Image (cartoon, rainbow, N blue to C red):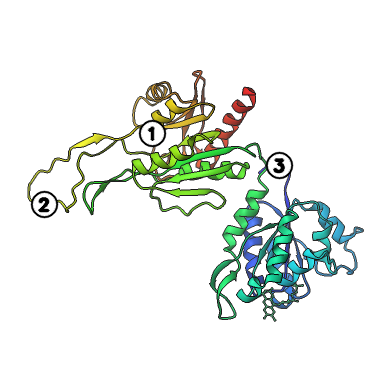
Amino acid sequence: MSDHKKTVVVGVTGGIAAYKALDVVSRLKKKGFEINVVMTRSATEFVTPLSFQTISQNLVNVDMFQEPKAWEIQHISLAKKADLVAVVPATANLIGKISNGIADDLLTTTIMATKAPVIFAPAMNTNMYKNPIVQDNVNKLMKFGYEFIKPASGRLACGDSGEGKLEDTGFIAQVIESMLYDIKDLRGKRVLVTAGPTMEDIDPVRYITNRSSGKMGYSIAEEARDRGAEVTLVSGPTNLSIPFGVKFVRVRTNEEMLNAVLEKFESQDIVVKAAAVSDYKPKVYSQKKIKKNEDEFLLPLTKDVDILRKLGKLKKSQVLVGFAAESNDLIENAEKKLKNKNLDYIIANDITGTDTGFASNNNKVTIIFKNGDKINLDKMNKREVARKLFNIVTSGLSSRV
Ligand SMILES: Cc1cc2nc3c(=O)[nH]c(=O)nc-3n(C[C@H](O)[C@H](O)[C@H](O)COP(=O)(O)O)c2cc1C
């Protein structure tokens, strides 16, 4: 986050999910945002202002006509102060009012008066949400540039099942954080990232894979998304949850990854290959499960496709970034790979460290440029590595034009 502390005005309306907004406020507060909560009168029937006041560490505003705490007009000052207004949960009533220009309380007036982005997270009974009047209001607001976090499907508080459940609070907080990210230098750019391991089958039950967790690639995809890029994440099997706001393509084998990448490669501006793709695969796939008859079993392997090298050959204007996970002669091996595969940058990754590399949240890497320049980064978390990488790549992009 930048030095300027960003302010989020969180609007809370009178739905049964109002209590969940406490968790969203708590998450945003932990991320260092300044939070001002505005509740509708109905919302205070569900949760007390005191709860929001305690978690946000700020006075909670409900009434437009209350005695001013300071000499400022509340709805205008909040509207001006906001870097973003998020309505969690948003009732059918609130959505209907805003789409018709009604400003009859502090929250609706603040929303009408602000120039900051506004995002609604609706939550209501399924029939209510599917009501064409509500849908019409949502569509109208989207046309005006208001953002929505669509409700999830599931069992609702009223006992019905279907669409209308407030989206996961962690997800909502992430979307808000992403909207407020202070660098947006990848707007209009297409970024493709590969992540995770690949798996090559030996027989119907066994396969060869590697220890890649996918964390580095997922962090790169999230950083690119937050900087405004249109991101495609091609991922091998991992235990990580799918990042929101990216086009996600799940693959398993080297061949599937190759096909997914080739399909998109031409239209990309930046391609980062963080996946640990298999170098070898079994020469023959056994249709039947291999029996353990012999004391020794030799498995012949054959070279698999080098996707990165293939992309290096196909490359036109794309910036191509590779990774070199090495256990010895790190820089020397990475430099060779950079040249042989026609890359623009390579990230040399020493996998022998105990608290860095595979599965760890941290990494200690050296970024090597095509012209031989090198930047050694200290140990840092993978998201910070991703941030540094794009700082370098985007400054290279701007010096190209
Ligand atoms: C127990 C209860 C639960 C409610 N839950 C919801 C809800 O989840 N979503 C919704 O749109 N309205 C819900 N309502 C209706 C709203 O409270 C009502 O439309 C109110 O006028 C909304 O006011 P506001 O939009 O100013 O907060 C509920 C009402 C009650 C009594």
Image coordinates for residue 14, horizontal then vertical, percent: 72, 74
In the image, 397: left or right of 263?
right
Image coordinates for residue 104, horizontal then vertical, percent: 85, 69
290 vs 336: above or below: below
Regarding mark 1 in the picture, which secondary structure is present there? Answer: helix
Q: CA distance from mark 2 to mark 1?
A: 34 Å
- The amino acid on which the numbered mark 1 sits, given as a three-letter code, is Ile
Write the residue at 45% across / 41% down.
Answer: 194
Q: Nearer the viewer, mark 3 or mark 1?
A: 1
- The amino acid on which the numbered mark 2 sits, given as a three-letter code, is Lys
Which circle marks residue 292 in the picture? Answer: 2
Which residue, given by chain and number where applicable, does mark 1 sit on? 307
Identify the image quadrant of residue 52. Answer: bottom right
Identify the image quadrant of residue 299. Answer: top left
The first of marks 3 and 2 along the sequence is 3
Q: Nearer the viewer, mark 2 or mark 1?
A: 1
* Camera sees residue 14: yes
Q: Residues within 10 Å of mark 3 (few under 14, many from 20)?
A: few
The first of marks 3 and 1 along the sequence is 3
